[in-house]
Image: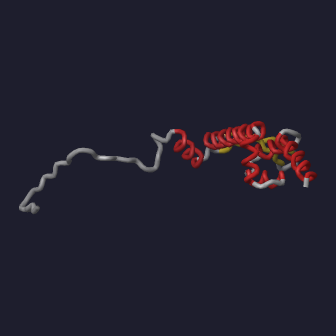
Amino acid sequence: MAKKAAIDRVDRVFWTEGEGLVQVEQWVKEGIFDKDIAKGIGITPKTLIEWKKRYSTFASVFEVGRGITKIKLVNAIYKSATGYYVQEQTIDNKGRKRVVRKYIAPSVSAQIFLLKNWAQNEYKDKWDFGVEGVIPVVINGDDKLED
């Protein structure tokens, strides 16, 4: 039984401090879910959570990696919302390869998403128009009020 504990310790050190940490960092940057990272390491998701709590270097790989991924996503959404140019390689009628500059139009969905998230007070689906105070009611004609 002591052999098993020694092997487990070596694996843990490999993944939390050693060369395996580079692989974990790559997985995190690729956007792989924690449960799949745990499976790749050969541990349970619960153990992964414990390792994050116990080993600061291991936890920082997740924080930094997820932050980089989030920045890339925000930049991609912004680029999609504002439109951009790409270069494509095409073949003309004579069979020659040509590089063509093509404009990708802005995405209205991306614009809506960004406005709703970045300027929540100005762009939201539901507005709360509360009425406070007393509203006077004028009744004309022969209507009678009953208590």
**What residue sits 61% from the left and 42% below the top?**
81
In the picture as drawn, the residue positioned furthest to the left comes out as 142
In the picture as drawn, the residue positioned furthest to the front comes out as 2
In the picture as drawn, the residue positioned furthest to the right comes out as 3
Picture coordinates of residue 131 (x, y %)?
A: 28, 46
| Observer-nearest of 139 and 10 | 10
| Image coloring type | secondary structure
**What residue sits 74% from the left and 41% below the top?**
54
Picture coordinates of residue 143 (x, y %)?
A: 9, 62
On the image, which quarter does residue 13 sit in? top right
Classify residue 97 as left or right of residue 103.
right
**What residue sits 73% from the left and 47% below the top?**
50
On the image, which quarter does residue 14 sit in? top right
If the image is split into quadrants, where does the C terminus sit?
A: bottom left
Numbered marks: total: 0
Classify residue 35 as left or right of residue 13.
left
On the image, which quarter does residue 39 sit in? bottom right
Picture coordinates of residue 66 (x, y %)?
A: 71, 42
Q: Image height check: is 6 above or below 140?
A: above
If the image is split into quadrants, where does the N terminus sit?
A: bottom right
Classify residue 64 as left or right of residue 116.
right
| Observer-nearest of 96 and 103 | 103
**What residue sits 88% from the left and 47% below the top?**
11
Q: Image height check: is 143 above or below 48?
A: below
Picture coordinates of residue 78 (x, y %)?
A: 63, 40
